[in-house]
Image (tube, rainbow, N blue to C red):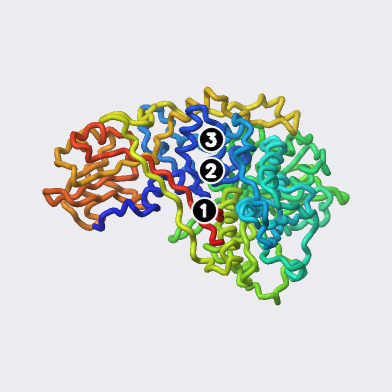
């Protein structure tokens, strides 16, 4: 088997599962340690460099980091009462935002002399704001163009205030505009050709997926006055154009937008609010915690019901009919919804909120200006690495690039687009991506002392306190999740396994005494004869079954054997390094920051 090249920056990055899973590659264990030491401002700035919106994402992120968290897969269910769970990474991010000091002095500023290049960002959402933040410090003049009166995009228009207070949005947007040479132009863009004719050096399209899917079923037109497209309705509520709704409300759809709609409806007068979904509960696209919050607010979720017709009487909506279905799967695992034969279900209602999906809408992009579109999806063809369109000075990001995802993906796209825009305007190859910065430092203080806390806590995940339900439902502006206080944050931070403190092996120091294999609590270290990967994985002390995570293989031992460590289940506890009599094992903190457009590598 090929020996592991630990000098490859991506090797240890992938071992830090949470950071690897985060689209913006936020150094999660590093900021959690800062929180554990009460250094909230430092934790905030670590987040701000990579994910740009710590306070916003600490409340609203889809948390791709948490399913990847090592804690959730290595805990012994018997030691935690069966409650195995990842570290509450997202909610700890919020702690950094809630308890930081004034961080204005740590924020970068634009150079006194600009470089003369002007960039227009269509849309003022998270992708465009990320582009602006990354490029403003390089002296580019950035203008964000949006038809909404305030910047923030979907962050401001589609996320209810009881989940994300407006002052948090205002603060984090202000950190970006405060850099300098970042302007806001409150207008609609009706023609990309017309925009390009204004003389911009580059255009970034971060306009989101602004169109909610509708339902073209019988009764739609007759009941139109009380049938609302979810994302449009949420936007109207956000800007206080809508302040009430009927007492009986049906919400159609199983995603996070549906959860926001139903919870908002409860606060605007909906007494009988139901969510009705065509799939099963586990198949719903909504995040588990979003479903839990809706159910906690007495909102039933009714599954396996397909909308069949809006029912009106005298031109007024009175209810909906649904076909009851079940799922059948073919040999390839493809699902088909099959009617059960039961009578159609009927639910009375005063209003319906349609939240069955979002899609892109580009009627403002002319098809004869050099931008190629995918004929099947009517989406622009965008390079997944550079975010560049077929028209070289136009770039895309966020939902506008590849369809609806989430805020953290928009941030990741913005970082990559900013690199490409800078490369393009410097007449450099946009595919030439800068390398990440890597710092690896031994944590050894004495022979068996480490500069990090390597005790493995057996605590279960700490629940996040919530506002009393009666108070929450009576005030649409009252934030429901109260967040961790410093004491709870410290307790949750102790659950982090410090996966960025890597076990590094030096074969030249090893005497093959097997002391490390004896003490390893996970049986993840094996000294054995080399072989093909499949064979080697089966011959380890504990078979390594997760092939998505590599094996750490080192040769150079006197016996000709190889050392093999299963990175998937290693606790990073350091017991191997403590037990080793020769120091062949070391614990080294591996801090990697993925590259961004910035002065550190700028080609001026």
Judge the density around disc 2: few (<14), some (14-19), many (≥20) Cα neighbours within 10 Å. many
| First along the sequence among labels 2 and 1 | 2
Q: Mark 1 points at which residue?
A: 600
Residue 473 vs residue 434, the one in the foreground: 434
Q: Which of marks 1 and 3 is nearer the N terminus?
A: 3
127 sits left or right of 223 in the view: left
Q: Is residue 294 above or below residue 215?
A: above
Label 3 and label 2: CA atoms lie apart by 21 Å
From the image, tell me which residue sits under label 3: 42
* Residue 334 visible within the image: yes
Tell me if label 1 and label 3 are in contact, CB under 8 Å: no
Q: Where is residue 574 in the image (x, y as percent from the top left)?
A: 30, 34
Picture quadrant of residue 160: top right
Local secondary structure at mark 1: loop
Label 3: element kind: helix
Q: Foreground: 118 or 537?
A: 118
Q: Mark 2 points at which residue?
A: 63
Please report contact status of discs 2 and 1: CB closer than 8 Å, yes or no. no
Residue at 65% across, 50% down: 110
User: The C terminus appears in which quarter of the rendering?
Assistant: bottom right
Q: Position of residue 322 (x, y in %)?
A: 68, 50
**3D distance between C-alphas at marks 2 and 1:** 29 Å
For residue 336, what is the image quadrant? Answer: bottom right
Is the N terminus in the top left, top right, bottom left or bottom right quadrant?
A: bottom left
Residue at the right extreme of this rendering = 314
Residue 596 % position (x, y): 53, 54
């Amino acid at each position: 088997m090929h020996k592991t090249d630990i000098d490859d920056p991506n090797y240890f990055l992938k071992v830090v599962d949470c950071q690897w899973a985060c689209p913006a590659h936020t150094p999660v264990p590093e900021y959690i340690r800062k929180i554990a030491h009460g250094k909230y401002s430092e934790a905030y700035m670590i987040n701000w460099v990579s994910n740009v919106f710590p306070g916003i994402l600490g409340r609203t992120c889809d948390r791709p980091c948490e399913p990847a968290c090592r804690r959730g897969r290595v805990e012994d269910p018997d030691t935690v009462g069966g409650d195995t769970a990842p570290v509450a990474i997202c909610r700890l991010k919020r702690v950094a935002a809630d308890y930081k000091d004034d961080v204005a002095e740590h924020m970068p500023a634009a150079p006194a002399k600009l470089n003369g290049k002007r960039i227009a960002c269509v849309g003022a959402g998270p992708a465009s704001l990320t582009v602006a933040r990354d490029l403003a410090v390089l002296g580019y003049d950035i203008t964000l163009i949006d038809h909404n009166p305030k910047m923030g995009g979907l962050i401001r228009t589609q996320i209810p205030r009881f989940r994300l207070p407006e002052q948090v949005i205002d603060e984090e947007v202000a950190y970006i505009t405060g850099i300098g040479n970042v302007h806001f132009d409150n207008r609609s863009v009706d023609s990309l050709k017309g925009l390009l004719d204004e003389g911009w050096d580059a255009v970034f399209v971060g306009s989101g997926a602004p169109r909610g899917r509708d339902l073209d079923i019988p009764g739609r037109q007759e009941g139109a006055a009380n049938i609302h497209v979810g994302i449009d309705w949420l936007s109207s509520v956000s800007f206080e154009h809508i302040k009430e709704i009927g007492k009986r409300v049906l919400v159609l759809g199983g995603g996070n937008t549906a959860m926001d709609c139903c919870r908002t409806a409860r606060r605007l007068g909906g007494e009988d609010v139901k969510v009705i979904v065509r799939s099963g509960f586990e198949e719903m696209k909504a995040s588990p915690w979003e479903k839990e919050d809706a159910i906690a607010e007495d909102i039933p979720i009714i599954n396996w019901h397909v909308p069949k017709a809006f029912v009106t009487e005298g031109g007024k909506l009175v209810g909906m009919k649904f076909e009851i279905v079940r799922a059948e799967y073919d040999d390839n695992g493809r699902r088909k919804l099959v009617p059960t034969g039961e009578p159609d279900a009927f639910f009375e209602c005063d209003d319906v909120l349609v939240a069955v999906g979002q899609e892109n809408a580009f009627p403002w992009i002319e098809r004869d200006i050099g931008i190629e579109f995918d004929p099947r999806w009517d989406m622009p063809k965008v390079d997944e690495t550079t975010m560049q369109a077929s028209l070289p000075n136009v770039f895309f990001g966020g939902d506008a690039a590849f369809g609806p995802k989430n805020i953290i993906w928009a941030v990741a796209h913005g970082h990559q687009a900013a690199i490409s825009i800078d490369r393009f305007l410097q007449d450099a190859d946009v595919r030439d991506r800068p390398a990440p910065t890597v710092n690896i430092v031994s944590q050894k203080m004495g022979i068996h002392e480490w500069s990090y806390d390597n005790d493995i806590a057996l605590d279960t995940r700490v629940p996040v306190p919530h506002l009393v339900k009666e108070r929450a439902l009576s005030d649409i502006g009252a934030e429901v999740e109260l967040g961790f206080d410093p004491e709870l944050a410290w307790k949750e931070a102790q659950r982090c396994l410090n996966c960025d403190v890597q076990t590094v092996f030096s074969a030249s120091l090893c005497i093959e005494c097997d002391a490390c294999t004896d003490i390893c609590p996970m049986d993840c270290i094996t000294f054995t004869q080399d072989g093909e990967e499949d064979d080697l994985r089966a011959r380890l002390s504990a078979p390594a079954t997760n092939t998505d995570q590599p094996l750490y293989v080192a040769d150079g031992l006197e016996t000709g054997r190889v050392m093999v460590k299963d990175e998937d289940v290693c606790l990073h506890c350091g017991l191997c390094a403590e037990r080793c009599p020769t120091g062949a094992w070391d614990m080294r903190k591996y801090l990697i920051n993925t590259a961004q457009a910035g002065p550190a590598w700028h080609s001026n």
